[in-house]
Amino acid sequence: MSEVKRRAVVEPKQHHKRLNHCYTRPAYRNGKKLTAVKVYTINDESQHLLIFGVPNIKLIEELKRTCFKYGIVKAVKPVRGYPDVEEFTEVYHVHYLKLSSARFAKRKLDDLSFFGGILHVCYAPELESVEETHEKLIQRRKEVHFKLSKLKSEGMKNE
């Protein structure tokens, strides 16, 4: 929590931009709410999230409380100097302990109404350290191995 006082410096990237909703998707593929079509690889996902659209009225404590609902948070920091931010809003960098928590938080917080602003959440893999990327890839390899072995054992039961 002591890291909150320091500000993160982040360069704008193409994947930080909000995509428009997909209106050409067949009706049977539409969910309950419209979403943009975007595919993430393990390299695109991250424990680091950028949250855009937070009203600039000193809401860091409320944002921390909201983020903690989805998992253990290592740090919440305001991002300074990010260009093209909506007027009267701020950008925050949130670092989760686990990738699964960041995935869950991204899904729940994106397009959430937060004190009058609509949040936009994106992954920020460019903020990961080499060690974090290495751990992420090892964890993904374990998950894939577990799922494949589970499918293999289920296939043997059916034969």
Image: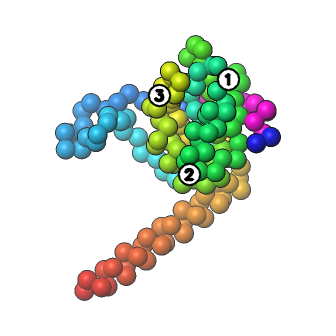
Q: Where does the C terminus fall, quadrant-wise?
A: bottom left
* Mark 3 crowdedness (10 Å alpha carbons): few <14, some 14-19, many ≥20: few
Name the residue at the left extreme: 27
Number of the label disc, if any, that sits on residue 58:
1
Residue at 75% in and 36% down: 4
Amino acid, disc 1: Lys
- Quadrant hosting residue 38: top left
Measured along the vertical axis of the image, is residue 144 above or below residue 50?
Answer: below
User: In this rendering, would 86 be left or right of 132?
Assistant: left
Amino acid, disc 2: Ser
Sequence order check, earlier mark of 3 and 2:
2
Circle 2 residue: 101
Q: Where does the N terminus fall, quadrant-wise?
A: top right
Membership of 49 in magenta stretch:
no
In this rendering, which labeled residue sits more in front, label 1 or label 2? 1
- Position in image of residue 24 (x %, y %): 24, 32
Q: The residue tagged with tag 1: helix, strand or loop?
A: loop
Membership of 12 in magenta stretch:
yes
Q: Quick check: can you spot residue 46?
A: no
Sequence order check, earlier mark of 3 and 1:
1
Q: The magenta stretch spans which residues?
A: 3-13
Q: The residue tagged with tag 2: helix, strand or loop?
A: helix
